[in-house]
Image (cartoon, rainbow, N blue to C red):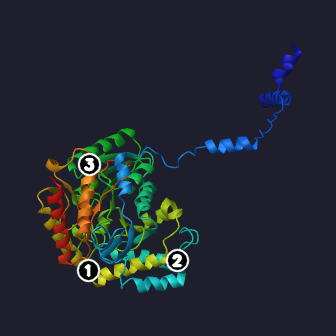
Amino acid sequence: MLEVLLLLEIPSDVTLHYVIYALMTIIIVFLFTRKSYRPKAPVVLTPQEINELITTWEPTPLICNKVDEYQKFNIETVPVVKSVNKELISIEGYDNLINFGTSNYLGLAQGSELIEPSTLGTLHATGLGSCGPRNFYGTLDVHLDFESRMAKFLNVDSAILYSSSIATCASVIPTFSARGDYILSDERVRKSIQVGNYTSRSNVTYFRHNDLNHVEELMIQITKNIQKSKQKEIRRFIVVEGVYQNYGTMCRLREIIALAKQYKFRVILDDSVGLGALGATGRGTLEYLGMKASDVHVYCADISTSLGSLGGVCCGEEEMVRVQRLNGSGYMYSASNPPYLCTAGMVALNTIDEKPEVVQRLQKNSVLIHKLIKEIPQIETEGFDECPFLVFRIIEKFRPDSVLEEAKLYQRIVEFVREKGAAISRTKYTNLEKYPPPPQIKVSVMSEHSEEQIRQVASAIKEAINTLVQ
């Protein structure tokens, strides 16, 4: 009884220490009384057993063998390019075809007398690569010069350069949108935007293509959800392309921006097709629609198309760009652009400013190719006339039932046109697309193309369709 009274008088923290010491003692005793671990002796194989194992071993394939017939056909029909010189291309089996399968719309990527001397000068001065990410010794003066020139070109505060066009939107979107935020996106956006939406871990909803009623309906629903949650720090974005790369259709951007303002959404615009190709001075979709870069919150674009360089840019307010320098994964962890390609981009921007006729020629050629191909009665297309490429399908009446057979028909049309001296392309998409586009034929134009060349390819396509489509 005396011991119990004495124990009750001991402070509680001392009692706790006794309990801990007791538990530690039990654990130590338990560990010491366990049997020690003795690994089994290694199995020694005879030379004969080793040879038998090597003979019967089958390595696990690095790539999944479950490739459907459609994807297999797409892989087998990829053309092998031997050389490109301005508007001419040589592929395996064909030499000096007129190139209507390129996104080098202004002809500044290969064989340009305007760009090559300047890029060679930078190459000799800096070497080929920058050997590091931008924040780790990968930033050279030409990177900063290009960003400054890009910002001036679009009349915005600042610009940031990414070394990969695909990684641009895939990095920008999760930089600003995170778990718990909301993203609305057109169902036709390209793969890099889909990746950015997914990796942001936000609440992502895809609306029907250019359907403003569906957009407003979803915006109202999201606004109600946010009000119910009573959380103030929930952000909302709408992500669109100026010109949809997989279809050649234009975004109803003016109406989208009006709805975004009404329901307090931020607009992220990918203008990869429009930059350098649309607008009176090549400033892209916004200029074409009579708008400014400041009308959207985040402006992204691929610079490997009209600008003939490599990578992508994100432009806008200084604070928006600054955040990406510390949080954009594609900026932080990827090696920066080869310096000579920054020079190529700057020369391209100067060319657009100093020789606006290059852009005007492209737009004239775009209108002509659309006019000629839309006259073919067996095809259907959604693209607008100033788009630098045209994507079309055979109308449903003549279209094969299966996706594979439709792709094979389009491949025969492509090969028929090659025999006539022109190169067009059949679109191929990964089966990881959120909403996979159907098989299509794509015809792109360049400012370098002459009217005679455009009429030649249109005539070849018409003849191919009349011959092969029954």
Q: Is residue 236 visible?
A: no
**Decide: marks 1, 2 in contact (CB < 8 A)?**
no
Q: Disc 1 marks which residue?
A: 358
Q: Earlier in the sequence, mark 1 or mark 2?
A: 2
Q: Earlier in the sequence, mark 1 or mark 3?
A: 1
Coordinates of residue 198 in the picture (x, y in percent)? 42, 49
Q: Is residue 24 left or right of residue 427?
A: right
- Three-letter residue code for mark 3: Glu
The residues bearing labels 3 and 2 have C-alpha atoms spaced at a distance of 45 Å
Mark 3 or mark 2, earlier in chain: 2
Q: Residue 128 got which mark?
A: 2
Q: Report x, y in % for residue 375.
A: 11, 63
Q: Is residue 224 left or right of residue 174?
A: left
| Residue shown at 41% from the left, 64% from the top | 165
Q: Nearer the viewer, residue 60 or 52?
A: 52
Mark 1 and 3 residues: CB-CB less than 8 Å, in contact?
no
At label 1, the amino acid type is Val
Residue at coordinates 79% horizontally, 30% vertically from top-left? Answer: 20
Res. 256 image quadrant = bottom left
Q: Is residue 173 visible?
A: yes
Query: Please, what is the three-letter code of the amino acid marked with disc 2?
Result: Leu
Q: Which mark is residue 405?
A: 3
**Label 1 to label 2: alpha-carbon separation:** 29 Å
Indicate whether 353 appears above or below 388: below
- Quarter of the rendering occupied by the N terminus: top right
Q: Position of residue 64 (x, y in %)?
A: 47, 46
User: Which of these two is toward me, 164 or 184?
Assistant: 164
